[in-house]
Amino acid sequence: MLREEKMCTAGEAATEIRSGDRIMVGSFGNSGYPEALVDAVAQSEVTNLTIISNDLGSPGIGLGRFLANRQVKALIGNYYNWNPDVAAAKNSGAIEVTLVPQGTFAEAIRAAGVGIPAFYVATGVGTALTEDKPTAVFDGRTYVMERAIHADVALIRARKADTLGNLSYYKTARNFNPLMAMAARLTIAEVDEIVPAGELDPECIVTPHIFVDMLVEKVKR
Amino acid sequence: MLREEKMCTAGEAATEIRSGDRIMVGSFGNSGYPEALVDAVAQSEVTNLTIISNDLGSPGIGLGRFLANRQVKALIGNYYNWNPDVAAAKNSGAIEVTLVPQGTFAEAIRAAGVGIPAFYVATGVGTALTEDKPTAVFDGRTYVMERAIHADVALIRARKADTLGNLSYYKTARNFNPLMAMAARLTIAEVDEIVPAGELDPECIVTPHIFVDMLVEKVKR
Amino acid sequence: MTDLVPKEQAKTRIARWIAQEFMSQQRRLFINLGVGTPTLVANYIRSDRIFLQAENGMLGVGPRAPSGQVDPLLINAGREPVTETPGCCYFDSATSFGMIRGGHIDATVIGAFEVDETGSIANWIIPNGRQMGVGGAMDLVAGARQVVVAMPHCSGSGKPKLVRACTLPVTGFNEADLVVTELAVFRFYETRMVLTEMAPEIDLDGLKAITEARFQVDPQLRTMAV
Amino acid sequence: MTDLVPKEQAKTRIARWIAQEFMSQQRRLFINLGVGTPTLVANYIRSDRIFLQAENGMLGVGPRAPSGQVDPLLINAGREPVTETPGCCYFDSATSFGMIRGGHIDATVIGAFEVDETGSIANWIIPNGRQMGVGGAMDLVAGARQVVVAMPHCSGSGKPKLVRACTLPVTGFNEADLVVTELAVFRFYETRMVLTEMAPEIDLDGLKAITEARFQVDPQLRTMAV
């Protein structure tokens, strides 16, 4: 029963996204991202999106399609050197870009998922990326206060799911996916394979199904 | 080579602890704690310890032995109802006790491990347990600032280690152990079994060996 | 305690009512059950949509383990031996309380010493110097989306537990959403406390006599299922 | 760049020197290597005590994957295909940067546009509007116990990269511990910059002429291994 509730196609999942939404996407340089979900969103009419991701793929490739399709209002992330279209769009005023150091970015997403509105880090103190943020001194060292990063929808990529929605990942594709799964109002996971509940080793489940709302099984080619 | 470096007996490990140290111990009500290490410390001469743990076992049992042996200066934890000796010792002025809500306690230990000196939570706002702590309002809700909890030594319990020191746990015994492994200057893990490096599934390692300094293999009886 | 409903029957009634409430929601629910009467709720849940979380790091807690099949490392937060359900999983306590504080737990069922008319809850300590424990109580009332209090209507000595203002140290302010006793069900809207169901053993005047908290009465007041 | 040491030889010399430095420490080391010359350090490490961390969630990074054995999901933070070593493991980016920020990474080796005489490092952006990326640079310089800068002594146009004060946006203030170029090795003590080794191709006057930063000279100044 649960299986039917959670499972859907990428196209169905994409209808959950509204123009203006804040969307997290698990990805690292065109690796380990939910390809079918990104495809479906890129083919949809939604626009004015805020995309929260490590990077934005390459020009017109991967997450880069959102920008090429003019679906982006703003970006929050940390590394756009792999997609020079981002700097060009920012310089022309077409989009806003908020750069957050990668570790702070990861932690801020986790924070959103675990009910922590703000936390302190030593990363970037005194630099251009934290100049508008409050600072505080603890035990003689200066730290900057960083805020949690929330989203409306998270599109994540996992290797295996069980029918409940428990997830495991594959190698370095784990990076942002389990964090983003916790941080959005609605989490949609694209997986290579769905197995019956109870088949994943309970000790090796990385994302408990409480964090997963919809499952899309990758269509085998 | 690494194996020889990291492996030792519980008695050898206990010599790393100095009187006055802050010691974290993974435990939940006499379950999932490093029995041989606790034994060794309880049999040693060290005193004036600050014990950072969920609870303090039962009177004279498990972590309760530290108190029975008068080795305790202070406790930081969240639930001492299972060991009424704690309240008695506190009331007589023999020890200090700092109660921290369990979720804040877990998060504060993690924070120490990941370079976060302070963070905000909604837990306990306005209550006796947070009355001395700064508060701040984010998005209209009041939060209290909590500080990281560090230790000199962490004594943790895992199920399996590999020779490098990677760890996996067993069922609910996971609870505080992986967090404490990150939060101390020196982490000593007591494990049921040590296998060659490469035998644990890289996707299922819970504590990477970077966090583990010494390994004690449980003596089979 | 009143003598209107025998003690064990009172616990069963409360637990069954709460289980029914969850099952009627017809959606996936993640629930954390506190020790005591709240744990009994599990006995009456029949649904593959309801998942129990134990704050010591487990999701998918099954029924109590039968004696002879007890695993000392498979326990709930009250140290009771439990069982696994298919698809259960384990995680550290930071993740566990991340679920709770992060708003992922739909409901927590807890006991209480006192609940006041603003929904504040006192359930972590009776300052007599003999108990020193907070556990996850403060995290749960602050973090769970719905806070359900399961408790006898009056204390062992017959005093009201639903009071005007908590006299014991508070666990969380204005956090109660639902209070279920053996005699009544109250819902909190913002800080309004509303009686929505009443047991057949009592009438409104009788209830008011043993309820110090001031409450409104739902125009649709129903008889509590017993 | 100077023309004293050919470019490829310069890179090799720097990478080899740093590898030797780590191997001489005779203890377990966890190291994060940045893209470019820092990655080359891996080629010269022969030690089962040195473990490489990739900030995209891997500990125990092995050599670059030979073509034909490339797994697109087994990559380092520079998106290069790598291999696994026995005992390697994977984790999410919050844990990965937890290792870095929490002081568990013994050393990071990074490139830089500029390092100034107080040890401040500029390596994340040249404000020309065409690049927008910080990646993990700020986390690494703030978090790693030892920050090793591997860079050519002068820029491509021949300008000093060791300057009095960074002119480019700073990544971290007073964070450099060691700067290794093809011509010299400098160590930072608090904010004192000290020349400890110098390459055979140059003398002190020559080095000062291409080093804008003011530095002290170690009385034990040695010839850099080349």
Image (cartoon, coloured by chain):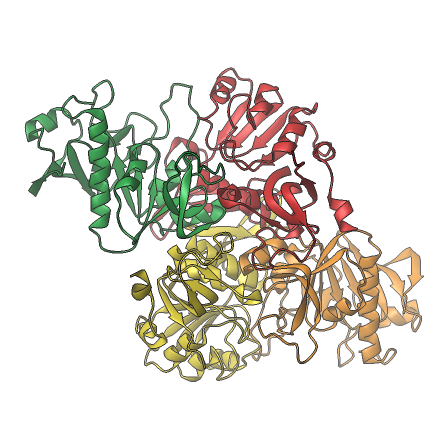
Chain colours: A red, B yellow, C orange, D green
In x, y percent, where is residue A214? 70, 43
> Relative to residue A119, is residue D207 drawn left or right?
left
In x, y percent, where is residue A184? 63, 41
Look at 70% across and 66% down and name the residue there. Answer: C62
Where, by quadrant of the figure, is residue D15 drawn? top left
Q: C6 or D72, which is in the foreground?
A: D72
Where, by quadrant of the figure, is residue C164 drawn? bottom right
> Relative to residue B106, is residue C113 drawn left or right?
right
Depicted D127 relative to depicted A117: above or below = above
Look at 84% across and 62% down and name the residue there. Answer: C20
Depicted C69 relative to depicted C92: above or below = below
Q: How many marks?
A: 0
In x, y percent, where is residue C175? 69, 57
Asked if one can make out residue C214 in the rendered structure from this viewpoint, the answer is: no
Asked if one can make out residue D22 in the rendered structure from this viewpoint, the answer is: yes
Q: Residue furthest front?
A: D68
Q: C24 or A31, which is in the foreground?
A: A31
Depicted A34 relative to depicted A141: above or below = above
Q: Quadrant of the C terminus of chain B?
A: bottom left
In x, y percent, where is residue A95? 55, 21
> Relative to residue B137, is residue B167 drawn left or right?
left
Q: A200 or A10, which is in the foreground?
A: A200
Q: Quadrant of the N terminus of chain B?
A: bottom left
